[in-house]
Amino acid sequence: MFIDEARIRVIAGKGGNGCMAFRREKFVPRGGPSGGDGGRGGDVYLECTDRVNTLLHFQYRRIFKAGRGAHGEGSQRHGKDGKDLVIPVPPGTQVFREPGHDLIHDFSGPGERILAARGGAGGRGNARFATPTHQAPRRAEPGRLGDEFDLSLTLKLIADVGLLGFPNVGKSTLISRISSARPKIADYPFTTLEPHLGVVALEDFRSFVVADIPGLIEGAHEGHGLGDKFLKHIERTKVLVHLIDVSQPRDPVQDFKTLLRELELFNSDLARRRQVVLASKIDALHDPRSLTRLKIMCARRKIPFHAISSVTGRGIPELVHLLARMLGLQPPS
């Protein structure tokens, strides 16, 4: 199950109480105060790791609490510090603090770590309050509470190329041909109900990541169909590939204009990103004239155009090289 949104509460540990004690040892007359300090409460961290690729684990646990500090003891023994808590999140996770929905951090790669909630300080024991004029203080501090915050997490996939198109245009089939990803493939709309990532291997151990975004329909930016639930996953992509099904009696030019309009309405920056128009299912071309019109429109907009058949493999190697050149992974031909 692919989960890309979650809301959690992080609670740092409470500091331990300071101790009020006096030395009662043989041969030590008037030993004086000996209460130790309480331990510091544990911190809560968020750490990015590639061991997880979804926020599914937050569906079963929503409250994360670090360890509390131990209380101070006599003979000036310091309480043990509380155990820190490290919460793993996948790359591409954005962390917001509620209720203001303020962005705290945007994780881009494994190894990044942020402090989400700081543990409370331990209280001071009465030994800390002794002075020449007050040699037997009967005072000790309680430990302080740690931070407590509500956080909302949003996952945006990190991919180089995003595949867009209406339902059942061949996105899943294409990503299965160019990578090792094996998304569900069937001949009915909305086969893909969650995004898939595929790694495309090139020569010299180079590679790039392709994201298969579930099919869009007109009005997706308003929540129609699968809505804008998955549009956010293409905000990090460098190249957008529009798959246009030319095997159906639809107008491919109108389909492309609809996709552009949905991108513009969802995020105007996406409509200005580098794009490729891909005529899909060319092996079952319905009307050659519609394909010509699509080529002409792409030429006018100076958008690269390519035709493929994922079933026969026609145009697939050329497409991979085109995307690699656009990503700067291969020199221009």
Image: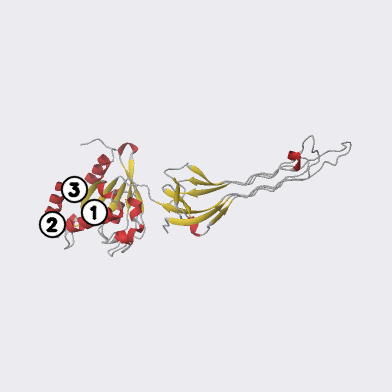
State the SS at label 2: helix
- Left or right of residue 55, residue 84 in this image: right
Label ID, residue 305: 3
Question: Residue 135 in the image: x percent, y percent?
Answer: 80, 38
Q: Which of the two discs, 2 and 1, labels the residue nearer the N terminus? A: 1
State the SS at label 1: helix
Residue 140 vs residue 164, the one in the foreground: 140
Q: Can you tell which of label 2 and label 1 is closer to the viewer?
A: 1
Query: What is the three-letter code of the residue carrying label 2?
Result: Ser
Residue 79 vs residue 150, the one in the foreground: 150
Image quarter of the C terminus? top left
Question: Residue 262 in the image: x percent, y percent?
Answer: 26, 56
Residue at 18% x, 48% y: name it: 305
Residue at 41% x, 48% y: name it: 92
Disc 1 designates what residue?
A: 260
Q: Which of the two discs, 3 and 1, labels the residue nearer the N terminus? A: 1
CA separation, marks 2 and 1?
A: 18 Å
Disc 2 designates what residue?
A: 290
Query: What is the three-letter code of the residue carrying label 3?
Result: Phe
The reply to whether the C-beta atoms of the residues labelled 2 and 1 are less than 8 Å apart is no
Furthest residue in direction left, as rendered? 289
- Left or right of residue 90, residue 20 in this image: right
The reply to whether the C-beta atoms of the residues labelled 3 and 1 are less than 8 Å apart is no
Find residue 170 and report its image quarter.
bottom left
CA separation, marks 3 and 1?
A: 15 Å
Residue 274 vs residue 115, the one in the foreground: 115
Whether residue 174 is visible to the viewer of this picture, yes or no, is no
Above/below status of 217 relative to 139: below
